[in-house]
Amino acid sequence: MPESPWQALYKAALLELDPNQLQVRVKAAEDAINARACDSRVPPNERVAMEEALFTLRVLKQKKS
């Protein structure tokens, strides 16, 4: 199964080392996840992955601030 755009943006946020770029990457990942979540055809397993990713992004923002 090909990687969804939100997954690539999520991975980029996780791997970002530059604190100045981190906020930009986290926002991009969150926006992509939220946009994908609006699609009613998203399978349940991907919805779970998106919820977990959003949680991880929130934790990442707190630790970096």
Image (cartoon, helix red, strand yellow):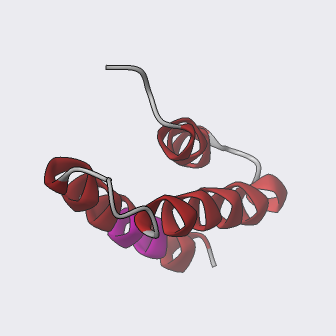
Q: Is residue 4 magenta?
A: no
The N terminus lies in which quarter of the figure? top left
Residue 14 placement (x, y as % from top left): 51, 46
From the viewer's perspective, tell me whether residue 55 is left or right of residue 36: left
The C terminus lies in which quarter of the figure? bottom right
In magenta, the rendered stretch is 54-59
Q: Quarter of the image holding residue 21?
A: bottom right
Q: Main secondary structure of the magenta part?
A: helix
Residue 60 placement (x, y as % from top left): 48, 66
Residue 40 placement (x, y as % from top left): 34, 64
* Picture mark count: 0
Residue name at image x 46 percent, y 70 percent: 38
Residue 11 placement (x, y as % from top left): 51, 39
From the viewer's perspective, tell me whether residue 62 is left or right of residue 1: right
Q: Is residue 57 magenta?
A: yes
Q: Is residue 36 shown above or below 58?
A: above
| Foreground residue among 38 and 11 | 38
Q: Is residue 5 shown above or below 18?
A: above
From the viewer's perspective, tell me whether residue 2 is left or right of residue 27: left
Q: Residue furthest front?
A: 41
Residue name at image x 50 percent, y 60 percent: 33
Q: Residue furthest left?
A: 45
Q: Residue furthest right?
A: 20
Residue name at image x 47 percent, y 41 percent: 7
